[in-house]
Amino acid sequence: MKENDIDEKVTLVGHSLGAKVAMAYSLLHPERVEALCSIDSPPVDRNEFPEMNAKTLKLVESVVELLPSIESKSYKEAWSWLKSMLKTDNKILISSVMMNLDKSSMDKARLLINVESLAQRSSLSEIMGFPLF
């Protein structure tokens, strides 16, 4: 928000991991948030459920593994490749990656989120507000 000079309060909408990030941001910066919409991510204390933390980290690591295949393609090629991957077992992961492809980056495909940074346990723990095991 600082980088884009957004000074007014915002409404944050997040799904799953994005909802957790939106919740964490709202708690850290309540003066910047007008409203919060959390989709498919209840505000549970994940310290009581360490198995959820491991699943979150595994999900992020799975996306990092896809990055070389995505970033070696143009946006359209990456979209087509990911679409062909929807036939695999990991449909939710693949569709989430598809939704996070940056449409403004046509020559070289890239994601809207920095999953490599998130894959570092310390970064994800800081954002989410709970330790990862």
Image (cartoon, rainbow, N blue to C red):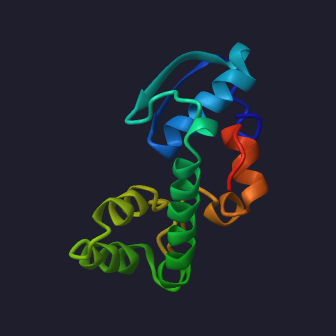
Specify whether residue 108 is in view: no
Q: In this view, does 104 lie to the left or right of 119?
A: left
Image quarter hosting the N terminus: top right
Where does residue 5 sit, x and y in percent of width and height? 73, 32
Q: Which of 19 and 12 is in front in this view?
A: 19
- Residue at the far front: name it: 48
Count numbered badges in the picture.
0
Where does residue 55 sit, x and y in percent of width and height? 51, 57
Name which quarter of the figure residue 118 lies in: bottom right
| In the depicted structure, whether residue 85 falls above or below residue 126 | below
- Residue at the far left: name it: 87
Where does residue 19 sit, x and y in percent of width and height? 50, 36
Please give the name of the residue rendered at 74% of the width and 25% of the height, measured from the top-left corner.
Answer: 28
Please give the name of the residue rendered at 53% of the width and 52% of the height, measured from the top-left corner.
Answer: 51
| In the depicted structure, whether residue 39 falls above or below residue 61 | above
Please give the name of the residue rendered at 47% of the width and 70% of the height, measured from the top-left corner.
Answer: 106
Q: Which of 93 and 77 is in front in this view?
A: 93
Where does residue 63 sit, x and y in percent of width and height? 51, 68
Please give the name of the residue rendered at 72% of the width and 13% of the height, measured from the top-left corner.
Answer: 31
| In the depicted structure, whether residue 29 falls above or below residue 54 | above
Q: Nearer the viewer, residue 130 or 5?
A: 130
Specify whether residue 107 is in view: yes
| In the depicted structure, whether residue 79 falls above or below residue 32 | below
Name which quarter of the figure residue 120 lies in: bottom right
Image quarter hosting the C terminus: bottom right
